Amino acid sequence: MTKDEPWLTVGRLEDIPKQGSRVIAAPGGNIAVFRTVDNEVFALRDKCPHKGGPLSQGIVHGKKVACPLHDWKIQLDTGIAVAPDEGCAASFPVRVVDGVVELSLTPNTGCPNH
Amino acid sequence: MDMSDMPQTKKLKLVMVGNGMAGVRTVEELLKLNPDLYDITVFGNEPHPNYNRIMLSPVLAGEQTIEQIITHPREWYAENGITLHTGKKVVKIDRQKRFVETEDGTRADYDRLLVATGSTPFILPIPGADLPGVIGFRDISDVEAMIEASGQYKNAVVIGGGLLGLEAANGFKIRGMDVSVVHIAPWLLERQLDEPAARLLQSNLETKGLKFLLQKQTAELVKGESGRVCAVRFKDGETVPADIVVMAVGIRPNTTLAESAGLHCDRGIRVNDTLQTVTDPRIYAIGECVNHRGIAYGLVAPLFEQAKVCANHLAQYGIARYEGSMTSTKLKVTGIDLFSAGNFTGGDDFEEIVFQDAGRGSYKKLTLKDNKLAGAVLYGDTLDGAWYFELMRDGTDVADIRDKLLFGRSHLGDSGHGDEKTRVMSLPDNAEICGCNGVCKGTIVQAIVAKKLFTLDEVRSHTKASSSCGSCTGLVETLLSATVGGDYSTAPSKKPMCGCTDHTHDEVRAAITANSLKSMPETMRFLDWKTPDGCTKCRPALNYYLLCAWPTEYEDDAQSRYINERAHGNIQKDGTFSVVPRMWGGLTNPKELRAIADVAEKFKVPEMKVTGGQRIDLFGIKKEDLPAMWADLSAAGFVSGHAYGKALRTVKTCVGSQWCRFGTQDSTGLGVKLEQMTWGSWMPHKYKLAVSGCPRNCAEATIKDFGVVCVDSGYELHVGGNGGIKVRVTDLLCKVETEEQVMEYCAAFTQLYREEAHYLERTAPWVERVGLAHIKSRVVEDEANRKMLAERFLISQKPAQIDPWKARAEGVASWEFKPLAEIA
């Protein structure tokens, strides 16, 4: 993989449990890759904007994950906390190509907490 | 997107006649369930959008303004695409052609019609009733007339000493008028209060300056020189001066429109349990204009329940039924606390418990029937009203708490909040209500007012108060009801499991067994779950209920478990885990301790601690190290201690007869046997046992879910205790003679709790909710049932007693503990 290729292969879709998450250990800190009940895949920095809890360990429901530490709900598509809580976890571009999950380490814009 | 290519489905037309609280709540619920089904048109008589009619009394008293009580401004209708016609009276319903028409000829076609025309004040048919200055107390225009009169005139008379009449009189008094309340009955609020409470109320109101004319019948309203009313004359010939007269003698369902359309009316529009009119199923009716099973409700809580059911049917879900409500009453006169509910007048089959302290202005009366609370009247101290209401609603057997019942829910005072004299509303704004999240009273009250919060859940999500351990829930509920007004405090008769469903915990459990629902998607489908895959509240609950109902068949859904139960360790604030191996009955030996020491050194465990449950906790373990650590512990003979689960935790023991000079039985040995029987079982909440060898009770068995206290002649069995936030001492279940009996009773009690408690309900609140008498009847008095319960427990234990640590050390769910990928 060369530096000008933004997509990194991280595993197969089936390796992530439905309504669950797996962790990608990355240089800038862990990234959690989520798979919803409808097989949608999202990636967030594995750090709750509240007290830094590992979002990968939370319960995934709909397009949200509940942080295991204090039950903040974080939206998987944007990384933004569900109101009235405020804050965000950086989200990363992720896609599934032929059952293979590919991730970009360049976060989406909109959240300062990389 | 080019919409012309899309198939155009035509929306159905819903027309609502009446723009009041019940109707608008129905529309609101409908929009939540199925926002795109209808084009909605609303007709309202009054020129205003929807407002909170309950709060008219505070507006009259000058405590709130009209703007403050508007709940749905015009923008709300616009945002939701609702066509709103205010100040337009519907005079015709054409049921054949399906349209309604107003006085000025405005027409609207409908597919479904919702009649929510409310009620009108009953005006006594006496001479002078139509004079200027004679009004009801029903809407904003009445209040405006009353406020105007108070600026110009001196004498006000209120006919009717009910809730509304007293609130009107109080408002006049505050605005500086001389007020007399005329009442036909011998005491005030005769439908809500018994005589002693009413006398206390009357004397309290008299000190505020109100005058009362009881057992007086009004004969005539006298016309003055200006053409306006000037006096009230009674049948006995006496008169009192009156510049304004408010008739508050009752309300009458507004059925003129419905009757003209041929809808069957009889003291209200007759509706069925789905709020459809009995005459025409396309037409729904709701609110004060309705007669449901012979009752026309005039309080807001039942009307909101009707709204929920009605919306459910309009949304074409068709699963809800309205079966009537139990109501309670509160008077909104500042400085007066009054609460009543249920049948408090009693009768031959009723028993009464009364507490009276005229000096303190306090009166409490409870009526009991068949050991259940049937009614309550509280005057002066109404803090426990909600609790009594709950006991009535749940039909709790109160035989065992009868001696304490009058003194209220003693634990409301709460740790950190002082003694029970501390009254929530007199607390300063900076008083901490929620100790977990550091939320003060002022913050909560401000959020309730500024964000217009109505429910406990809303307060929780906006302020975080009561959202962690829940011990301050009672305090927050009190603040909520005191801030928004009493009627909102009445708990709904059904508490849904969570926002994903309208069903209660009990209904869901019953449906699972009755319909052989054996998976979560199947259960959600069958019960019309509103979300695709539930939430963090219902998923763990459903997983438990399914597992409890089908112990040998159900496939556990790990993704619906909290991380601790998925990873079989306790997550700590830094994301590491703690590991607690099981030590049977708290016993250990050099070999075990050596093995733990070796593991701790090998995995560089930063901290170790002896737990309150007599075992050893290893902290700071990285998730990826867990399976390897478990492999070592497993090799040394340890199994999981389940210190992380809604499960059997520990069995605490004292040394007992083997060593202790006071010990009466082998408490340690019995503890080990109990732990071997119960370990591995999943529970609604954490579950702890203890066995003490003598009544000195060194194992603290009387604050455990199931505690055994050995005595010389046998074993006392205690249930429903816990330490923690709200310490609760156990209740004595019974006394037995042999260890075998202890085992059987323990299995039976445990299984009854597993089968009946709500998820996340510990034994203490469960015992209080269902009553100890119920538990005794199932476990102690009914031998056959006890044996069946115990057998079901043992069956469910077979698949449960597979050590999850050993399984994972051998490779089960290995992905859980490994990153998916590592990027250098």
Image (cartoon, rainbow, N blue to C red):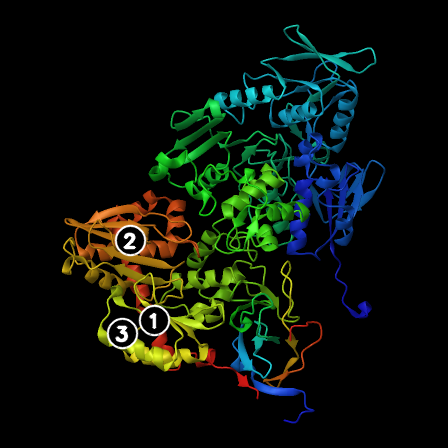
**How crowded is the residue under tag 2: few (<14 C-alpha within 10 Å), some, or many (20+)?**
many
Any part of residue B151 in sight: yes
Give how far across and how far down residue A45 sits, in percent. 60, 75
Mark 1 or mark 2: whose residue is earlier in sequence? 1
Mark 3 or mark 2: whose residue is earlier in sequence? 3
Residue underneath mark 1: B640
Q: Left or right? Give the position of B301 relative to B624.
A: right
Label 2 near label 3: C-beta < 8 Å? no
Tell me the quadrant of the picture where the N terminus of chain B can be found. Answer: bottom right
Residue underneath mark 2: B700
Question: Can you tell which mark lies on residue B593?
Answer: 3
Camera-nearest label, 3 or 1: 3
Q: What whole-number distance in Å separates the C-alpha atoms at marks 1 and 2?
A: 23 Å
Residue under the image location 70 percent in, 22 percent down:
B246
Label 2 near label 1: C-beta < 8 Å? no
Q: Left or right? Give the position of B400 relative to B574.
A: left
**How crowded is the residue under tag 3: few (<14 C-alpha within 10 Å), some, or many (20+)?**
few
Q: Secondary structure at mark 2?
A: loop
Q: Output the chain of dot 3.
A: B
Q: What whole-number distance in Å separates the C-alpha atoms at marks 3 and 1?
A: 16 Å
Observer-nearest of B452 and A35: B452
